[in-house]
Image: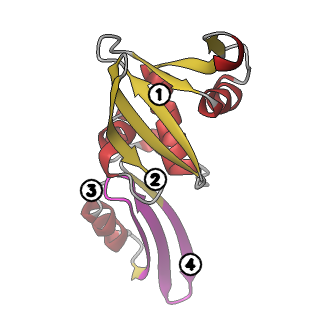
């Protein structure tokens, strides 16, 4: 398991750095070029380094912790020779990075995603509903009978806390 270690100097609030193999990994994976890598020092003592903006840091953190399963993420703060570990997370243990992972407006505005299928039969309609709650990190699945006004579906959507948004429909067939 590889470690994505990022360093944060409090005096440079909006920038982070990463070094060594992690610098090369971030440059290739997120910047799609190795020209972002600079060498600190000279000769055999040189070490690769990449500067990461706050926005890129959030992107890297989300990708490493929510999409990949082969990395851990560590954040150190300090300066000079005085650095201390302030946050550490793995894909299964997001605790200390939750405020970064779930802070963007897109996730706050639509924390629940729902997929529906209606199966019309002679004796009524059966509705299949699946959802993911991004805030609570919960997956759900249900099937229930409904009437022609979809009152049970409406109750289920209200219980999930969904806001009505006609523009959020993906793959709808009317």
First along the sequence among labels 4 and 1: 1
**Disc 4 versus disc 1: nearer the observer:** 1
Q: Residue at x 48, y 40 (%)?
A: 62
The residue tagged 1 is: 57
**Disc 3 versus disc 4: nearer the observer:** 3
Q: Residue at x 31, y 58 (%)?
A: 136
Q: Residues within 10 Å of mark 4 (few under 14, many from 20)?
A: few
Compute the Cα span from label 3 to label 2.
29 Å
- The answer to whether residue 169 shows anywhere in this view is no
Label 2: state its secondary structure: loop
Q: Position of residue 74 (x, y in %)?
A: 43, 40
Q: Are marks 2 and 1 in contact (CB under 8 Å)?
A: no
The magenta region covers 115-144
The image quarter containing residue 105 is top left
User: Outermost residue toward the bottom?
Assistant: 123
Compute the Cα span from label 1 to label 3.
30 Å
Q: Main secondary structure of the magenta part?
A: strand
- The answer to whether residue 144 shows anywhere in this view is yes
The residue tagged 3 is: 161
The residue tagged 2 is: 90
Q: Are marks 1 and 3 in contact (CB under 8 Å)?
A: no
First along the sequence among labels 1 and 3: 1
Please give the label number shown on residue 120.
4
């Amino acid at each position: 398991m590889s470690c994505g270690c990022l360093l944060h100097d409090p005096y440079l609030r909006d920038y982070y750095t990463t070094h060594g193999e992690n610098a090369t990994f971030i440059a290739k994976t997120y910047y799609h070029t190795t020209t972002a890598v600079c060498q600190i020092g000279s000769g055999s003592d040189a070490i690769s380094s990449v500067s990461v903006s706050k926005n890129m840091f959030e992107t890297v953190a989300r990708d490493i912790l929510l999409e990949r399963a082969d990395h851990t993420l560590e954040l150190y703060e300090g300066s000079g020779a005085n650095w201390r570990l302030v946050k550490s997370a793995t894909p299964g243990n997001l605790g200390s990075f939750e405020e970064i992972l779930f802070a963007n407006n897109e996730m706050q505005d639509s924390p629940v995603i729902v997929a529906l299928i209606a199966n019309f039969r002679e004796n009524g309609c059966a509705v299949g509903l699946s959802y993911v709650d991004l805030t609570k990190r919960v997956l759900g699945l249900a099937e229930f009978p409904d009437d022609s006004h979809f009152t049970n579906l409406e109750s289920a959507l209200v219980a999930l806390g969904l806001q009505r948004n006609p523009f959020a429909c993906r793959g709808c067939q009317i």
